[in-house]
Image (cartoon, rainbow, N blue to C red):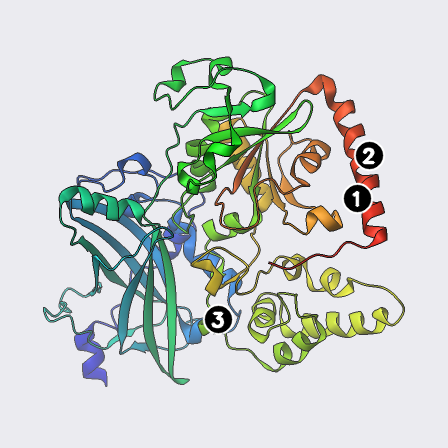
Amino acid sequence: LHSRRARSGALRRPRAGSSSRLALRSSPITRCASSAVPAFPENASTYCGSENLWVTQELPRILEMLPKHNPNDGLVLTRGSWHATKPNASTVVLKGTMRFHNTSGGRFDLFVPEVTAWTKLLSKTSSTENLSVTTKIVPKHDDVDKKPRLDGYWEAYIVPMHGATSVEVEIEITGFGASKAEDENLFASLDAAWLTVQYVVYGHHGRTQHEQKVVLPLSFPDPNLVAMKAKDDGGERLKRNSSQDETDDDEKDVTYDEDEDENNTTHDKPLRWRTIKPGLQVLCVPTHLLCHLDDPVNVVKRYAQKHARRGDFVCLGETPLAAMQGRVRHPGSVKPGFCAKVVCRLFNRFSSLATACGMQCLVDMVGATRVFAAAAAAVVLRLCGMKGIFYKLAGAQAALIDDVSGQIPPYDQSIMLGPVRVTETCDAVETNTQLPCAVVDVNDLTKVTGAFLVLGKSAGVDLEIVRVALLGNPQGNADEQTPIVLVRHDVGRRDEILKGALDDEVARKKRAKRGVGFKQK
């Protein structure tokens, strides 16, 4: 055993604190520099490899949502940094560096005897049968004597106490169309690559299997589309303008006929402002499939800032923010315990806490004692006619967990946790974009119940106006992929807007009193 460890370099300690200092770096800024030919030059901030400083914070973010004691049996795999290149018109290569971290608290060495990976291509509009995808994994250990094998075989490796090791994953997507143009069309139809890395942890606990899912976007909407006014606001009809940064705000506001986008995909639809009330408009801004590689500040800068005026607010959905923070857990990596299996039975079938895995995610974050206590208090007080006690006692995350099927693919197969450090994120967005920011939780039920949750906001946000603008859920609840909403209002008509909203609220309560059915989607 000792000779094996000596050969593998497992007893050689890494530089003290090097990985932890890198992981805890707090700047959300993304710096990108690469000599390779980028596959997506229009969005270099997502795929910029090791220069992506947002990804350096990934390990502490992952540990926040895992059990405090021995997470993932002591070995956590981060999704890592990635870059995308296009060697030729028929090939796209995604290459990333993922990292195993020994989180056993300095108690055990852990073995990684097996690592396998595969990739699924996702497209909403076409088949992927004419595209070939190959996934390779290459160990990148700090020990120079541990060289990867040419046949792709993964040799068992020992990750020492407080140590870490890396694995390079290469995804090659090749088109087999009849022509170069057909290959380009095939690549343009792709939405994302969905990578699964499965690994075995072997050690004091026995032998267990774990996996990490990575979403890698392959389609990016054009951020230079002109935002058009609603038809009843007047103005001339214009098309895409690549030099819009040189035009003033009045030239950007154009009209749009709603009937023209019915057959278009989300990314092809022109942007248009929607009138919610006279003097109040919203712009639902589409983005690519957001993932752990995306910094919220950069996303707002890229997609929303050029459409905004002074006085506008920007609103982010809580689920997209959680996706950018990597707060996603696949049920295959969740181990429901006794507490989760018992308490989940107390919830109605529509709740995200009504499954053992969904409840276990909450237990992992706040502890079994708190969940048990909250459940017991909720049962007793429910007999006295008090509702919602569990969510108040179990913490804010209890109401923010979205279980399987609650998101767009491929996140629909995973459990999405609520975002963290929301107020700090909003402040960072306002500081870097001069746009007051709020993070909200709105869905189709909001139209019926009037429930509206603001998780956090920066100082310049008018919450009453935001509530009126988003209460009807203009960004949709399906696969519209519009996580950013710009809110614009006429300050001089604020009282008129709020009075109209008050009348709408009275009408909503009357409908609710009569009884309004809601069919769950």
Secondary structure category for the residue under label 1: helix
Estimate how packed mark 3 is, as few (under 14), some (14 to 19) or many (20 or more) residues with alpha carbons within 10 Å. Answer: some
Q: Is residue 82 left or right of residue 353?
A: left
What residue would you read off at disc 1? 508
Q: Nearer the viewer, residue 362 or 409?
A: 409
Cα–Cα span, label 3 and label 2? 44 Å
What residue would you read off at disc 3? 331
Residue contact at pointers 1 and 2, CB within 8 angstroms: no
* Image quadrant assignment for residue 474: top right
Relative to 484, say whether 312 is above or below.
Answer: above
Residue 448 position within the rendered picture, expressed as x and y whole percent measured from the top left: 73, 49
Q: Residue at x 26, y 36 (%)?
A: 41
**What amino acid is labelled 2 in the image?**
Asp
What residue would you read off at disc 2? 503
Does residue 203 appear anywhere in the picture?
yes
Secondary structure category for the residue under label 3: helix
Q: Earlier in the sequence, mark 3 or mark 2?
A: 3
Camera-near label (3 vs 2) is 2
Q: Nearer the viewer, residue 371 or 25?
A: 371
* Image quadrant assignment for residue 426: top right
Q: Is residue 507 left or right of residue 79?
A: right
Cα–Cα span, label 1 and label 3? 38 Å
**What amino acid is labelled 1 in the image?**
Arg
**What amino acid is labelled 3 in the image?**
Pro
Q: Residue at x 27, y 57 (%)?
A: 128
Q: Is residue 248 left or right of residue 278?
A: left
